[in-house]
Amino acid sequence: MPNMSLKKNPMPEQAADVRNKNFFEVTCGYTEEMALDEAQRCLNCKNPACMEGCPVAVKIPDFIRLILDRDFEGAYKKITETNSLPAVCGRVCPQERQCESRCVRGIKGESVAIGRLERFVADRHLQSGDTAIDIPKPNGKKVAVIGSGPSGLTAAGDLAKLGYDVTIYEAFHTAGGVLMYGIPEFRLPKDIVQKEIDKLVKMGVKIETNVIIGKTILVDELFDEFGYDAVYIGTGAGLPSFMGIEGEALNGVYSANEFLTRINLMKGYKFPEYDTPVYVGKNVAVFGGGNVAMDAARSAKRLGAENVYIIYRRGKEELPARFEEVMHAEEEGIIFMLLKNPTRFIGDEKGKLTGVELISMKLDEPDEGGRRKPVPIEGSNEIVDIDTAIVSIGQTPNPLIKKTTDGLETNKRGCIVTDESGATSKPLVYAGGDVVTGAATVILAMGAGKTAAKAIDEKLR
């Protein structure tokens, strides 16, 4: 019998006043009983609209039906037919804007908890210790993948399954890209990411770390000296943007990129066990309203800040972060100062940050993108005492590859221009993810990697 409850099974999680003092995962995952009960809410639609909202085309009703049959390993195999990183996607994919937004159960209640079920299946597989990997037959072709984030990992996995000899080149000392350096441990445990990467290595994918393409090796050299048949660029958008206001060079002002990299990849949250100190004062202000801003604010709270502010120039309804992240931040004591914008940072005679001047905003007519434009209210300036500022207003692609590669077209934002298949203006060079779109979601980057892998295979065959 279908479960006709209008609400999802709630996700177990740490209490807010406990979790905001540790970096353990906030959500604890479904039990088998919860997963079976939630799976019964799926109506097994003849024309599943949920699949239309999935960038990697997971066969959602099929894997949920296998959960109901208690064939959890079968459900895992069904997901991984199209999704190489199910344990990651089950945690950080914005299902509420994608597959779950199309679920017919959402018309008169809450949609089926597709993401939570995906996580349950993936975690169950990882806990089972099943490490068997089908090694594909080599096809004699070599592909280089630049960047080991979600887009690069997906492209590498799909190409490896087709028999390609794949090598991933990663600039950092650890593979995983934004999954490792950007998303905090309490949202995405690093051992989960590493297990997903280990699967690719067992499949035959090679990973070369500490290699900066464009400096250590040029793109043309990958073809001419290393003998690759095609190259995929999935380097993301790792160059932080700043606001260009007075005082941004003061001590105590971080980019969110640096702040989170120090905490996540360099394990700064374990200082002094790991020698990567992260300065966090008593009063921290995070500027921005996306998921990265929420991650930075919640991390600062865990590092001991007394007051952490999210300062955003629009209202709560316009916050681009996932609803779940905003809710968790509020529960953990993050203070939202909305319809505010900084005009300058203030420092002492030693160059240390002591405060920020804010001006109140009001929402005017919608801009070109359909969002109501924030405009300042004259005379509404105020000073807020802060000793740490974290700027989280977006990121752009690193220009290094463009500067060192002839014939690679980019747009005015520095993003690589591609066609629908991921092909760039340079023959046999493909690109996808944030390096093409600008900062977006993990699952969209994965979808781009999957599309490009298919196009590379069609081209080389």
Image: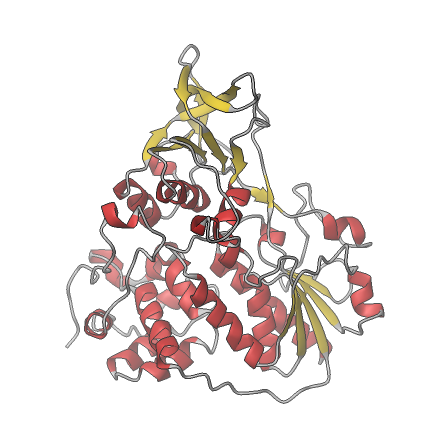
The colouring scheme, among rainbow, by chain, secondary structure or one colour, is: secondary structure
State left or right for residue 160 relative to residue 411.
left
Q: Which quadrant of the structure image shows residue 98?
A: bottom left
Note whether residue 185 is visible. Answer: yes
User: Residue at 46% of width from left, 31% of height from top?
Assistant: 388
Q: Which residue lies furthest to the bottom in this view?
A: 137
Q: Position of residue 373 (x, y in %)?
A: 46, 28
Is the N terminus in the top left, top right, bottom left or bottom right quadrant?
bottom left
The residue closer to the viewer here, 228 or 257, is 257
User: Residue at 60% of width from left, 71% of height from top?
Assistant: 156
Q: Position of residue 339 (x, y in %)?
A: 38, 26
Note whether residue 54 is visible. Answer: no
State left or right for residue 340 relative to residue 225.
left
Answer above or below: position of 93 versus 395. below
User: Residue at 46% of width from left, 45% of height from top?
Assistant: 292
State left or right for residue 29 relative to residue 349.
left
The residue closer to the viewer here, 451 or 201, is 201
Q: Which quadrant of the structure image shows residue 305?
A: top left
